[in-house]
Image (cartoon, helix red, strand yellow):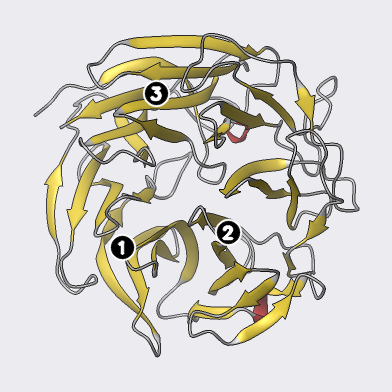
Amino acid sequence: MAQSRELGAGAWSYFGDPRAISHDGHTFTGWISTDGNVWVARLTAGGTLSKHLLFRGLGRDDHNNPSLVFLPDGRLIVFFSPHSGHGLPPPGIPSKMYYRISQHAHSIDGWGPLHTVNTNAPGSLGYTYPNPVLLRDRLWLFWRGGGWNPTFSYTDDRLTWVPARELVFHGGGERPYTKYVGDGQTRIHGIFTDGHPMAFKNNLYYMRYENRVLFAANGRKLGTLDDVPLHVSKLDRIYKYTDATGRAWGHDIALSANGGPRVVYTRRIGNRDTFYYAYFDGTHWVSHKIVEAGPMRPSFTSGGATLDHEDPRVVYLSRRTGTWHQVEAWFTTDNGRTWTSRQLTDDPNHYSIRPVSPRGLTEANRVLFSRGDETTIGFTNYKTRIHALDF
């Protein structure tokens, strides 16, 4: 079994993405360190590692990881914010959405000044979970905003942002959790829950944006940008909660070769998760079981999952089969009806969780993940390290 490469001491959450992107076989990634600083790194196809401290003092919280995207000219833009909400961030750390732009294409060697996204939805709950999506020359940014709902803005000049608006909402104090993917041209796809599965009996929903119109997977019009925010119940439902089948938790969405969405998510019953794979067959959303996630640990229920965005027949997931969670690759040729699998990590003393496949990586197999042990007991008390594995 191949040995992983440690990149740095730090962590990341499930919902700030992309956490890793690729160009010409080289991986660009980032993390929030164990002392609360924002780092970015470049790992070449041959394994040479370089790192840069991008921002100091954002706060020790695994929600604070940076999200990365390439601009059309190849420069890197990196977004990050402190975890915000009721009682967060800690005193002395202002809730702002920050970003910096590299000075050179596909490089982390030089950076421009610190910028802020100076718009947000109404409310006192700040910014969390940046998700940048580039469509041609327009850069969209999605985040959890001031009202604790999915919020968005966009910029055409990398400096001026249109007034932020909420995209969807649930109400009643719930906060929908989201994942996004764009096709680089005209479409953005997203998945949404009603709220957090510890507090709500979640369904899972889908919506597609194209030219100011919002669609279900079958092309049914859900509304336009003039109608937002939409209540999550008005979206295209992928999965309906029942007591027997559990609470949904969206992990990733990617696009097949023909542009169709592929989704990996979990269903939670009690404190046990099971991984599922979903696709739209032209008429209905269809879900197939992948595998059970295994017993939870004190700081997480499942180890997380991601799709290979260049080949979404592949799911990288982390599950517990013994003492520790390990990363595995699962492969399907029939939209999730049947699976083959391969174990990728086998550390006898640590768990390996929250795997990420670098977006844009086409010529090699590389997965990044977070590694730790029982000394990590929460999202602000982590002693994890980011690793990369070539296989």
For the point 66% across and 80% down, the residue is 233
For the point 78% across and 25% down, the residue is 115
Kindly state the secondary structure of the residue where label 1 is placed: loop
Snapshot quadrant of residue 381: top right
Residue 9 coordinates in the image, percent (x, y) = 45, 15
Residue holding disc 3: 386
Q: Nearer the viewer, mark 1 or mark 2?
A: 1
In the rendered structure, are the residues bearing label 1 and label 2 in contact, judged by CB atoms less than 8 Å apart? Answer: no
N-term mark: 1 or 3: 1
For the point 13% across and 53% down, the residue is 341
In the rendered structure, are the residues bearing label 3 and label 2 in contact, judged by CB atoms less than 8 Å apart? Answer: no
Q: Amino acid at mark 1?
A: Ala
Snapshot quadrant of residue 258: bottom left
Residue holding disc 2: 198
Residue 301 coordinates in the image, percent (x, y) = 43, 49
How crowded pointer 3 is (Cα within 10 Å; few <14, some 14-19, many 20+) is rated as: many
N-term mark: 1 or 2: 2
N-term mark: 3 or 2: 2
Q: Amino acid at mark 2?
A: Met
Measure the C-alpha gap from mark 1 to mark 3.
30 Å
Q: Amino acid at mark 3?
A: Ile
Q: Is residue 331 left or right of residue 361?
A: left
